[in-house]
């Protein structure tokens, strides 16, 4: 009762002090809030600058003080002179507060001896609109007011204390009655005798006894149990799992399960443990365990311990060695695991071709990994090329494919022949024992692993050799797997690099830059292309094949080749994508028919765009691919809506095109979705980052744009391949374009031919005028004779001179051999002889026959060759 009373008094005192402190803190917070609100109220700062601030501020301060239930709200200037006070006689006197820091913009809370007595107050600055301080506001209440609030709570506190005292008194009576019932009415003397008797019996027996409750806490342990388990003095009452016992022993004792003569290891002892559950009268269940020292089983225990250690070692090796498909990293994991498990130093030497993924050839090895308990060891460092020869253990082990043990290196029995000077350093350093194990996997020796022990460890023995051999065998399989992966990855990377563009073609329509970054998972199927087209136009293509590895790279190559082939036909984007989709479906069908389990092409995507530098017109279409970003010369970034179409190989949906008119200097950014989607970033967020990056480079070249986008949006280990293609547009000088309407009158051919010759002279191309006139004559005659209106002629002076004749017919002309008696049929033959290349492309309203000529070094005229001789060169052309 006395103890409870003391606790109640202490608690009451603490509550009163806490309440007083809380009331004072609450008063400070309320004063600070009122002062800040008053200081920032409209008109306060301006009133400070009037001739009579007191007349304006005193009523407002008093109204605020009464509403906030404070004892004072005082306004003072920056020199601390009061303008207001609840007692007018103090107006004009210096403020009792630390107001100088407040003038500099700070807030000060304090307890001072003021005009009203002991005061708790807060002082805040009055800010002007320009950020300066016009004055200060001090608000607060007296300490007597704060104490009064606490005193009003005292009856409740004292009432609670009285209730607690009454409750403690009743609880004491109840507990006393309960104890009397549990002791079965025994008095103190009888209980003392019973305890002494039980204690004498319990601690005199030579068998350990432990009693554990249902919560796993130790209730009682006799002297023998404490000795056998080396229990601490304060063990009773603590959880069994916290007494430093062997985990297996602690688990048994805490579980309470039945056990009969279970053998457990406790330090250097083997204990036979028996355990049975028990239940006490109070309802608490637990268990009692007896422990018996079985020293005769020590030898068996030692062997079991060694076997368990080896099994644990090999088990952990499986999870720590070979975590990556990297040859060097796997070798490092082997050495790091061996030290300090069973060796002080460990080295791995691999046949040099293994590091490149090739089959091991020769016996020249490179030191690949070294680990040790110290860094100043004399062993050869990583990177050194070594060729073991003679009778050294490494040469014997590598050649015979078996382990070699040198239990005592100080005997110098041949192991020092490789390098006697280095061998002396090794022994002088303190290394005295060595095991060399060949790294063999799938009947191939990849290298050797060597383990060393120094003076602080026992020498290796035959048991260590067996254990080390098993460990190294597992590591060798991991190294061989890494070697095979390295080889296959190098092959896939080589294939992919060969399938991607090796360089960009020469053309004048676009300035182009590109970037490609493979995924962390390996070689993928992203690709891009820049393809020059007739008429000075350029095609841009970007595609993505789902997956990684050789199949994805090969599929990418097939699709890229198909795009090149379809581009040679000069198909519009929607038709090209439709043909590509049909081809992908055929690939999948052929693969399904062959019965292979390789993934199909379905899921690949492609975006194809054609840019015309004459008109600045860009036409594009796609299948399952994100649309491009367009950066206009004013840095406006847009993402044109590409009509949604399924990925390649799915088919069933029409392909639609998007047409854009791009001002000169616009930039097109074509990319794969790996650039946008990344770890922790969704597609919309990625587009936002791309938009900001492109907009932040108003004058950036394509190369600078590519680099900035990659620096901002890519990570060191991307989850998917990334391909980026940036092109800046150019417009062909209008002065380099000449056009004529071609009437259906053969007489117009001569007129247009003459005007074309004049235009060539104006361009300074008189050297090729004859050839151009001949080509134009043949093409115009062909259009008038076999085509239909409307017809037109166009000359383009770009990297080459391009002659185009368009008409409304969709009939394509064919090159053929004219017979000797034929009156015609030689026109296209002449065009083919004089032009670098020629062809036909179709338009929505007909076709265009075009021919390109070099601007310099014109072709030899036909006059230099006999007609029949020239025709003989085309004997293989079908008639």
Image: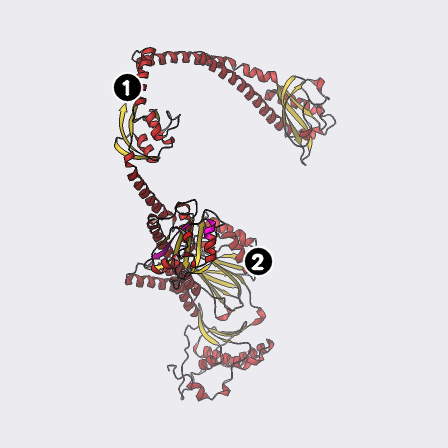
- Was residue 78 drawn as part of the magenta stretch in this picture? no
Instruction: Residue 102: name its quadrant.
Output: top right
Q: Quadrant of the N terminus?
A: top left
Element type where label 1 sits in the image: loop
Is the residue marked by circle 1 packed among few (<14), some (14-19), or many (20+) residues within 10 Å? few
Q: Is label 2 in a helix, a strand or a loop?
A: loop
Foreground residue among 510 and 430:
430
427 magenta-colored? yes
In front of the other: 662 or 12: 12
Which of marks 2 and 1 precedes in the sequence? Answer: 1
Is residue 454 in view?
yes
Disc number placed over residue 84 in the picture, else none: none
Circle 2 residues within 10 Å: few <14, some 14–19, many ≥20:
some
Q: Quadrant of the C terminus?
A: bottom left
Q: Quick one: which residue is furthest to the front in this view?
A: 411
Q: Residue 281's mark?
A: 1
Question: In this figure, which residue is indicated by the disc labeled 2?
Answer: 700
What is the magenta range?
Answer: 426-442
Compute the Cα span from label 1 to label 2: 88 Å
């Amino acid at each position: 009762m006395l103890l409870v009373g003391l606790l109640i008094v202490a608690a009451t005192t603490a509550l009163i002090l806490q309440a007083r402190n809380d009331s004072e803190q609450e008063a400070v917070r309320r004063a600070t809030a009122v002062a800040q609100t008053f200081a920032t109220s409209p008109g306060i700062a301006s009133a400070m600058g009037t001739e009579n601030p007191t007349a304006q501020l005193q009523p407002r301060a008093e109204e605020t003080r009464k509403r906030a239930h404070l004892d004072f709200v005082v306004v003072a200037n920056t020199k601390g002179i009061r303008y207001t006070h609840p007692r007018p006689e103090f107006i004009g006197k210096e403020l009792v507060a630390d107001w100088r820091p407040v003038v500099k913009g700070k807030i000060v809370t304090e307890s001072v001896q003021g005009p009203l007595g002991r005061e708790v107050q807060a002082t805040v600055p009055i800010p002007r609109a320009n950020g300066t301080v016009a004055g200060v506001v001090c608000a607060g209440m007296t300490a007597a007011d704060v104490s009064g609030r606490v005193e009003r709570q005292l009856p409740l506190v004292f009432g609670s204390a009285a209730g607690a005292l009454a409750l403690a008194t009743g609880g004491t009576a109840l507990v006393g009655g309960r104890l009397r019932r549990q002791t079965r009415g025994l008095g103190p003397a009888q209980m003392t005798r019973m305890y002494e008797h039980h204690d004498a019996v319990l601690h005199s027996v030579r068998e350990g006894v432990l009693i554990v409750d249902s919560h796993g806490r130790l209730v009682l342990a006799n002297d023998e149990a404490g000795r056998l388990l080396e229990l601490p003095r304060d063990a009773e009452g603590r959880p069994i799992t916290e007494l430093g016992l062997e985990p297996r022993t602690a688990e048994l004792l805490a579980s309470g399960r039945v056990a009969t003569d279970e053998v457990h290891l406790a330090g250097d002892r083997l204990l036979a443990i028996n355990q049975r559950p028990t239940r006490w009268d109070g309802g608490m269940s637990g268990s009692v365990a007896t422990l018996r020292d079985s020293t005769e089983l020590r030898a068996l225990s030692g062997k079991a311990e060694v076997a368990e250690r080896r099994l644990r070692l090999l088990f952990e090796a499986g999870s720590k060695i070979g975590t990556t498909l990297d040859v060097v990293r796997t070798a490092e994991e082997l050495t790091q695991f061996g030290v300090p498990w069973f060796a002080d130093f460990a080295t791995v030497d691999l046949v040099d071709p293994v590091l490149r993924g090739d089959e091991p050839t020769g016996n020249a090895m490179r030191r690949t990994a070294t680990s040790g308990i110290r860094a100043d060891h004399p062993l050869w460092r990583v990177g050194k090329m070594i060729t073991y020869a003679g009778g050294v253990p490494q040469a014997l082990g590598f050649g015979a494919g078996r382990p070699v043990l040198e239990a005592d290196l100080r005997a110098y029995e041949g192991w020092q022949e490789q390098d006697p000077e280095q061998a002396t350093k090794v022994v002088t350093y303190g290394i005295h024992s060595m095991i060399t194990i060949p790294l063999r996997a799938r009947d191939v020796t990849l290298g050797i692993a060597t383990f060393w022990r120094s003076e602080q460890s026992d020498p290796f023995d035959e048991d260590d050799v067996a254990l080390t051999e098993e460990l190294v065998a597992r590591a060798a399989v991991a190294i061989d797997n890494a070697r095979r992966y390295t080889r296959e990855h190098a092959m896939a990377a080589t294939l992919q690099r060969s399938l991607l563009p090796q360089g960009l073609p020469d053309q004048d329509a676009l300035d182009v830059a590109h970037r490609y970054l493979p995924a962390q998972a390996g070689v993928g199927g992203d690709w891009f292309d820049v393809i020059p087209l007739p008429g000075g136009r350029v095609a841009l293509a970007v595609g993505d094949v789902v997956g990684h590895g050789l199949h994805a790279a090969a599929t990418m190559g097939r699709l890229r080749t198909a795009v090149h082939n379809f581009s040679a036909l000069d198909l519009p984007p929607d038709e090209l994508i439709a043909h590509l989709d049909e081809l992908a479906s055929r690939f999948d069908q052929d693969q399904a028919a062959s019965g292979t389990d390789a993934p199909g092409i379905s899921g690949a995507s492609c975006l194809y765009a054609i840019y015309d530098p004459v008109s600045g017109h860009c036409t594009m279409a796609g299948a399952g691919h994100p649309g491009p970003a367009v950066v206009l010369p004013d840095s406006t970034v847009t993402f044109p809506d590409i009509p949604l179409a399924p990925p390649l190989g799915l088919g069933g949906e029409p392909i639609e095109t998007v047409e854009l008119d791009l001002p000169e200097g616009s930039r097109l950014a074509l990319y794969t979705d790996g650039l946008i989607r990344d770890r922790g970033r969704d597609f919309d967020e990625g587009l936002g980052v791309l938009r900001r990056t492109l907009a932040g480079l108003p004058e950036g070249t394509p190369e600078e744009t590519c680099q900035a986008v990659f620096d901002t949006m890519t990570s060191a280990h991307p989850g998917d391949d990334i391909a980026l293609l940036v092109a800046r547009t150019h417009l062909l000088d209008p002065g380099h374009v000449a056009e004529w309407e071609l009437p259906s009158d053969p007489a117009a051919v001569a007129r247009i031919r003459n005007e074309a010759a004049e235009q060539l002279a104006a361009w300074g191309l008189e050297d090729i005028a004859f050839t151009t006139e001949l080509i134009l004559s043949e093409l115009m005659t062909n259009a008038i004779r076999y085509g239909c209106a409307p017809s037109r002629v166009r000359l383009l002076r770009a990297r080459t001179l391009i002659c185009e004749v368009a008409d409304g017919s969709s009939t394509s002309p064919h090159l053929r051999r004219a017979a000797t008696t034929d009156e015609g049929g030689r026109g296209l033959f002449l065009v083919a002889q004089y032009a670098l290349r020629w062809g036909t492309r179709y338009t929505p309203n007909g076709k265009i026959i075009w021919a390109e000529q070099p601007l310099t070094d014109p072709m030899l005229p036909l006059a230099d060759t006999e007609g029949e001789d020239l025709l003989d060169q085309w004997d293989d052309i079908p008639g």
